[in-house]
Every structure is written in C-alpha cells, then in structure tokens.
Amino acid sequence: MNKIASRGAEQFDPALREILEDLIFDYAYALDDEDIERWPQFFTESGMYHLTTKENYDAGLPIGIIRCVGRGMMADRVKAFHTANIFEPHSYNHMVNRPLFAMGATQGTYNARCNFQVARIMQDGRAEPFATGRYLDVIVVEKGVAKFQERIVVLDSRQIDILMVVPI
Amino acid sequence: MNKIASRGAEQFDPALREILEDLIFDYAYALDDEDIERWPQFFTESGMYHLTTKENYDAGLPIGIIRCVGRGMMADRVKAFHTANIFEPHSYNHMVNRPLFAMGATQGTYNARCNFQVARIMQDGRAEPFATGRYLDVIVVEKGVAKFQERIVVLDSRQIDILMVVPI
Amino acid sequence: MNKIASRGAEQFDPALREILEDLIFDYAYALDDEDIERWPQFFTESGMYHLTTKENYDAGLPIGIIRCVGRGMMADRVKAFHTANIFEPHSYNHMVNRPLFAMGATQGTYNARCNFQVARIMQDGRAEPFATGRYLDVIVVEKGVAKFQERIVVLDSRQIDILMVVPI
C-alpha cells in the first residue's frame, strides 16, 4: 500500500494544495455531472488510470478491472461508452476525503492519497452505496495546471458489480 | 446543471476559501446538532433556499420539495417544525465534499458547488443512508461574514422520503 | 454537545489549519490501512480516547464503549488486538468532513469538530455502512507537531455492533 506518512513540521504551500485538491474534486464532480468527455483531460498525455481491488493491489498483481495507458486509450473508452455499451443508465455521487500529499519522486510531481465512497443512482431513482476505496495519485503540476500522471483506484471490496462502465 | 469548471491557474485566496467553506460546514453541523433555530441565519435577509430533485432541476422546472424565499419564511418553517409537525424524531449526519468555487455574477459574490450524502438517525437508533445530491450556492461575503444568497439543494434521486421535515 | 460556533471574521492561519487537518486525516488513513500500531502515536503521552454514543454523551454519562487514558493503555489495546481477540477480519473506510476549529482553553490547544461515516469491509468482501458520528477533539501543537490531547468519538446510533475491536 502506497502509504503517505505524516509529514510532521514539513508543510505544503496552501496555494499548491489548492491546485492539487481542485484537480481531485473537479474530477469527481465531472463524473457525477456525467461529463464523461472531460475524463481524459484530467490526465497527462501519457497518463495511466488503473482500477483494481485491494486484494490484487496488496498482492502486487498488475491485473485490474480497468486499465488505460495514455489519453488516447481513455478517449476510446469514452467513445465506447457512447456507442457500444448497453447498460441501465445511472449516475454517481462521489464523496472524497481531504487528501494527504507528499513530494513525488521527481521535481513538480506530488503523491496524493485519499478515500472515496461512491453512491450510484439508478434509472428508477434508487440511490445506493456502490463502491468504497482509495485513490493513489501521482500528480504533475505544469504552469499552474495539475494533471494525473497516474491514478490508481483501489476498491476495498473484491465483490465488484459487473456494471463498471463509467470510471470511478 | 450549474457547472463550475476547473479554473486552471486562476486561484482563490486561501483566507477567502476559509470563510466560504466555514459557512458550508457550519451549516451542516448546525443541522446535525439539531440547532434548527440557526438555520435562517445562514442566509441573507432575502436569501433563497430551494430543495428539488435532479430530474426537476435538469428540466428547468421551478417546482421543488421545499422553497423558502427570505429569512422570514425560513423562520416560519422553523416555528412550524416546533409547533405543527407530527413526525418520528430523527437527526442527520451530513457528509459534505470540498467545494469548488468560482467568482459570482456580482462583486463579492461567489458560486460554490459540492456534493453531500446525508445519513438519518431514527428514534430507535437506526442510522441509514437518507439522501445524496449536490449543493449549488451563491454566497455573499460582507465585512468578512459569509451568507447564502441562494442555496439550491439538488437531490440525486426522485424517490424522496415523505419525511422531509428538516431542511438538508 | 461541544458546539463550535461560526467564527465570523476571525480566521485561522491556513498553515495551522493544514497541521491540524493533517492529523485528523492521517489518523483516519492509518486506521483504514490497518496500521493500528500507529494509533497511540496520534495522541499525547497522557492523551484520552473516548468512544461513546450520542445518547450517553448528551446525558453527560461518563460510560462509553472504549475509554483509554494515556498512550500506555492504548498500546495495551493494540497488543490485545494482535494476541487476544478473536473476530472476523475486517477493515474500515473512513469518510471525514472538513473540521471546524476554535481556539482551545489554553495556549497552543485547539478544539475541533467534524463528522464521520465509516464503512466496514468484511472478509468476504462486503462493504457496508458501519458507523456515523462526530469527532470532538482537543489538539495540541508543539514545535509544529499536532497530537490529540482528547478525542471523543460520539456515535449517532445506540445500536452498536458488538464487533468494535478496532478504534474508529
């Protein structure tokens, strides 16, 4: 587990935290607003999105439920969402915790970790708990703009609904 | 849907964000503490509270579940809560996400958007998921004090419990 | 109920808020990562942890579900967790709201209040709503490091699962 330990006295610049947090919450709200077209734009050109379970992640298994490398592959997925998939319409409501940040491996990159709990709202209006887990991110900031270089979504449960059409 | 897009490099003053966020969380905690008397005070004198469903909101329908215009009307609602209503006692637990902010239409006003998920705790001690949705706010800051000029509560689900006595 | 009222124009230094919030979220993520060994370290040497129900708390009853005074007693609890207890393995997912802060009774101490909703993930992979409530904290900051002097966990419901092995 990518553990971001308490930083003690070391502090983050509040303005930087603002930029990083805005990325994380803008992402969540875009998905909740069903703005799936915006989804690839939250990543760098070569960014990676990996949705997996805690069980697989802890075992170091590269197998996941969704894995997209590069914005092109993400755009394909968005396209497939509109054209190919047949599923009951639904939307999400993301609850996301305050992230903890740490300096990344290279200059201008930051590691982030936060929890989420997502409710799913079905066609008939039911809202129900859908997925819980954590986001493990590597974020790049260039000219004041933050993007995900890597977003690993670790689901707590291995009982995943097969209806995982929209990224979390 | 009132969409607040990513602001890129443009930033909010952290001290201003503090004032705006405190309003949003103070509101949530006041309701959770059953301090319903404080509810109208979170609004400007002519402030508007509108609780509706996503379905109605997206269709542009002005119909809602609760609609109060002005602090006087809110005070009446609080009074009715104590004197007229018969219902099983319950309390709330609000989970509210970090808001995204944007400059409002006029000087000193700010638009905010955040998600919520509310649990309801009944007399017998059951705690259960109650409502999910988003807050769409117009906030005014005067002399360092923030108030809602407009708070639109958009519920994700159209399956609303008829027991909507206390505002969300 | 320890009510932290709106502070109006009075403001917190963003850097101080950062330190205080990091403690609260680091605590949550440590428990979610099953790093229970770290749990006593979030408290001062003589720190107090008290887990109780809203009913008992509002009635001023000192009775609680878990009560530890001092880091030694917490370490004993952690040890018991590993050696003595027999229970179905499970983990948590904490959702914690943005806290409201107020100056504490003595220099360098701060009162905090925030809500939480915890999901529990069982061995078989089920994730389910487990507990909702609020944290009422007294936090001490010394040389830039924040610790809980007092953390009172007030559960909304009096229907508590007997499987309360791991602190919340």
Image (cartoon, coloured by chain):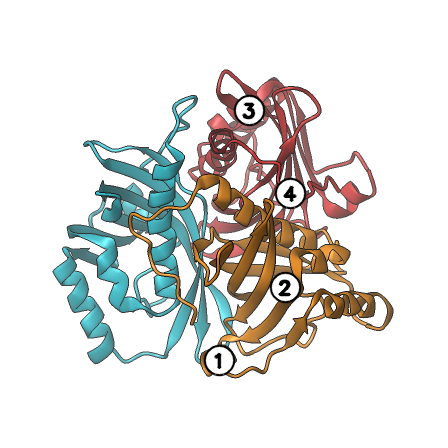
Chain colours: A cyan, B orange, C red
Q: Which chain letter matches label 4?
A: C
Secondary structure of residue under mark 2? loop
Q: Position of residue B46 (x, y in %)?
A: 66, 66
In the rendered structure, which amino acid carries the disc numbered 3? Lys
Local crowd at mark 2 within 10 Å, few (<14), some, or many (≥20)?
some
- Residue position marked by numbered label 2 in the rendering: B168
Q: Position of residue B132 (x, y in %)?
A: 53, 65
Q: Which chain letter matches label 3?
A: C
In the rendered structure, which amino acid carries the disc numbered 4? Gly
Secondary structure of residue under mark 3? strand
Residue plotted at (27% across, 49% down): A151
Do badges 1 and 2 share one subunit? yes
Secondary structure of residue under mark 1? helix
Tell me whether circle 2 and circle 3 mark residues in contact (CB < 8 Å): no
Give the alpha-carbon distance from disc 3 to disc 1, as whole Å: 46 Å
Q: Tell which tag, 2 or 3, sits nearer the viewer.
A: 2
- Which of the two labelled residues, at mark 1 and mark 2, occupies the earlier sequence position? 1
Residue C163 occupies quadrant: top right
- Which of the two labelled residues, at mark 4 and mark 3, occupies the earlier sequence position? 4
- Residue position marked by numbered label 4 in the rendering: C8
